[in-house]
Amino acid sequence: MKKKMSFRRFDAELDTDVCDPYNNAELTLTLRMGFRQINPAAGAAEGSHHDYGDATQPARRIIRWSDSSWKAWKANFLQSAEAFWNGRFWLINDAGTFAFARGATTYCPNVWCRFRLVGQDAATAGSHHTIDVVRLHASENWFGSHSTLYDSKDTNLVHKSTDSRGKAVMQRAHVHEVGHLLGLDHVDVGKPHCLPSGDTNASACYGIADGDMKAAMGSGMQLKPENAYPWREALRSFALADSLTAAFRPVSSAGLLRALQIPIVSLTSVWPARMQRHYPRTAAEVQAGRMIVSRPNRAV
Ligand SMILES: [Zn+2]
């Protein structure tokens, strides 16, 4: 089965046709970004642009995009951000959903999280997000970017913070921004020093402990299992639709009967994320996992 769903931030496709005892289902999130050039006024080769596009902020020197520099910048942005987020997480099937039989064994596939980043001209319809991009003059090393205004150096690896041992924490800003576009918050949002009700862009929200500071949703480049959140939320929608369909399907095949022996727990399942590949689970493994999860205080 291949099924598609559209969400506000991305489109999603779940493919269970690729499943076998060694290969999991694949969930691909596709994010379409519209890109728009910001060039010096009146066709000039050089000009200036204010930080954050705010006339009260300092102005930085910018130069006109050429066709080749624009093409190369976009290609690098798309390729590197896609590679960063693609195929990094597996969601472990604790729901007994999408079961399939091979011989006498019923398997429940885990879900491999794929990512596609598509670039298009800002004027083309269908972008999930549109950004303006300035091309910085070689003499400028910093520009005030925000979520819809980038600069040509946002794809470079730069020194963002310093850890407790005095070591530089480096980041390519665009992979962090794509994390936001997928729906992720800064790494320490929800901790006492960065309450969700406060300013979640405050520096404390980028991580206090070294491990958090080095996170992609902090000031570094490391992914954490909780970054699988956008895939997990999309998957819940697919899993719920699948379990409803199964519940109302005529009970005629032996395979379906086997599948229905597994509790349908789509609403309470966790789909915990892992950052290494796990083979599809057998029905017995799913059920054993569920018993342990549901009775945390008792010996099983
Ligand atoms: Zn951020």
Image (spheres, helix red, strand yellow):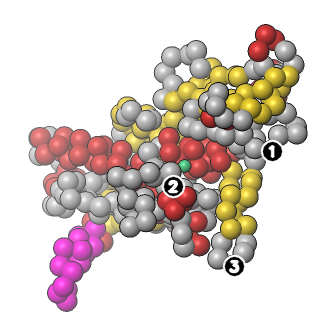
In the image as oriented, which residue stretches furthest toward the bottom?
299
Residues in magenta? Answer: 286-300
Q: Earlier in the sequence, mark 3 or mark 2?
A: 3
Question: In the image, residue 87 lies at what x, y percent?
Answer: 55, 53
Is the CB of the residue bearing disc 2 within 8 angstroms of ligand 1?
A: no
**Residue 215 covered by magenta stretch:** no
Task: Identify which amino acid the numbered label 3 is placed on.
Answer: Arg
- Residue 291 is inside the magenta segment: yes
Quadrant placement of the N terminus: top left
Mark 1 surroundings: few (<14), some (14-19) or many (≥20) residues within 10 A: few
Task: Give neighbour class at mark 2: few <14, some 14-19, many 20+ (Cα, 10 Å).
Answer: few
Type of amino acid at the residue the image marks with label 2: Ala
Between 169 and 237, the one nearer to me in the picture: 169
Mark 3 is surrounded, within 10 Å at the Cα level, by few (under 14), some (14 to 19) or many (20 or more) other residues, namely few
30 left or right, relative to 298: right
Q: Nearer the viewer, residue 151 or 50?
A: 50
Q: Would you name the residue on which mark 2 appears?
A: 202
Q: Quadrant of residue 6?
A: top left
Evaluate if marks 1 and 3 touch, with contact meaning CB atoms under 8 Å apart.
Answer: no
Image spot of residue 26 (x, y percent)? 45, 48
Magenta region, main secondary structure: helix
- Which residue position is annotated with label 1? 141
Residue 289, by quadrant, is bottom left
- In the image, residue 127 sits, relative to residue 85, either above or below, namely above
Residue at far top of view: 42
In percent of width and height, residue 222 lies at 60, 62
Q: Which residue is mark 3?
A: 165
Spatial separation of the CA atoms under disc 3 and disc 2: 22 Å
Decide: is 10 above or below 22: above
Q: Secondary structure at mark 3?
A: loop
* 3D distance between C-alphas at marks 1 and 3: 26 Å
Left/right of residue 254 with respect to residue 122 in the rendered view: left
